Image (cartoon, rainbow, N blue to C red):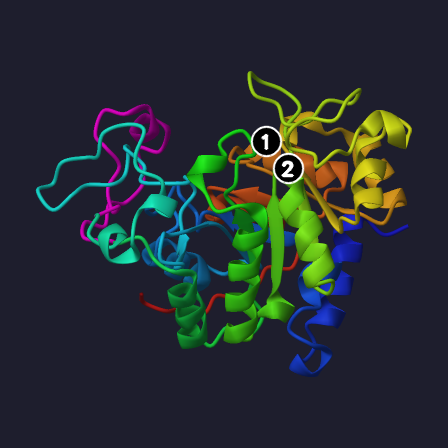
Amino acid sequence: MPSRAATILTVISVLTAGNAMGSDMRPDKGFDIEAHRGGRALMPENTLPAFANALSMGVDTLELDVGITADGEVVVSHERGLNPDLARDASGAYVSAPGTPFVKLRFADVRTYDVGQIRPGSAYARQFPDQRAVPGTRIPTLKELFALVRKSGNSQIRFNIETKIDPNRPDESLPPQDFVTRLLGLIEAEGFSGRVTIQSFDWRTLLLVQQRAPTIPTVYLTLQRGTEPTIALDKATSWTAGFNPADHGGSLPRTIKDAGGAIWSPYFGDVNAALVSEAHTFGLRVVVWTVNKRDDIARMIELGVDGIISDRPDLLRQVAGEKGIALPAGTPVAP
């Protein structure tokens, strides 16, 4: 019997034999290499330099996060507002915590901040000591990211877009209905509906995407450990839009399937082989986050996950290649 890696290699080879088969086929059938926030261990997160680096390197999917400004611009940022560890004003001073939410700022004001270098001495700086600073880098719009991909000529790359909405902090973003309307409107206007997935910890936004754009796959993010888990197996939480796994046989994969999800995206420490297998029996793909160490990447591939989101897409490519997984070609581009 061929190994899973060999099977994946065969499937990917078939699916990528020609553009006639469709640019959105490969990630749906093969292993998905995702650059988390563009690959934030290497370049400033969620910026055009980071995404250009990932495109040049070769990944299947650009993972990113979006918020919406007071005047309706869809901006790329992991935080719901200015990040005190990243955003510097015109004088070079980092903004004070907690940082103003985008929904309270006009885009012209957002654009004045420099996010090209981590605050020295911060915990974030210690986490990614090798990140290359790019001073002068601005918070990009989603439209600008789409333009960068067009410039690269990459017709295969996909976008895994997270809606940055916290149901416990409704004043820090647009309401889900307005957020989804604005995001889907831009994606459709830009012609990328066939190349995106929408992900969120806030399942309300995913239900809205499923209603309004049923052809766009939804990715159900989950976290079951730590001080702020989003999931409990015995009750609904503020994140799960009323869904209680206890009403679905106590199975989180079944809950996500019943909610209408296409992909389950758990924290990698929350999964094991049995859960991956269970998700597959419900027809769900499993894409784990955020895996940055060689041994963990190898272990996740061996568990049978369908994709990995990593701050180190370079290392993810290396380990995947060692496992016999076909690697996506790079398309060199400058921001």
Q: x%, y% of residue 326?
A: 65, 59
Q: For numbered disc 2, what is the local secondary structure?
A: helix
Q: Nearer the viewer, residue 26 or 166?
A: 166
Amino acid type assigned to the residue bearing label 2 in the image:
Ala
Residue drawn at point x = 56 percent, y = 36 percent: 291
Count of all numbered marks drawn on residues in the image: 2
Q: Residue furthest bottom?
A: 20
Seen at 19% across and 41% down, the residue is 88
Is 78 or 97 nearer to us in this picture?
97
Q: Which residue is mark 2?
A: 298
279 to the left or right of 289: right
Q: Residue 165 appears at what percent x and percent y?
A: 52, 41
Name the residue at 76% across, 28% down. Answer: 272
Main SS, magenta residues: loop
- Whether 15 is among the magenta residues is no
Span colored in magenta = 114-137
Q: Is residue 120 above or below residue 158?
A: above
Q: Can residue 318 be seen?
A: no
Give the residue drawn at x 67%, y 53%: 208
> Mark number for residue 295?
1
Looking at the picture, which amino acid does disc 1 mark?
Asp
Gap in angstroms between the C-alphas marked 1 and 2: 5 Å
Q: Position of residue 309 (x, y in %)?
A: 57, 44
The quadrant holding residue 240 is top right
Q: Describe residue 113's horizontal placement relative to residue 305 as left or right.
A: left
Q: Are marks 1 and 2 in contact (CB under 8 Å)?
A: yes
Q: Is residue 76 visible?
A: yes
Q: Is residue 121 magenta?
A: yes
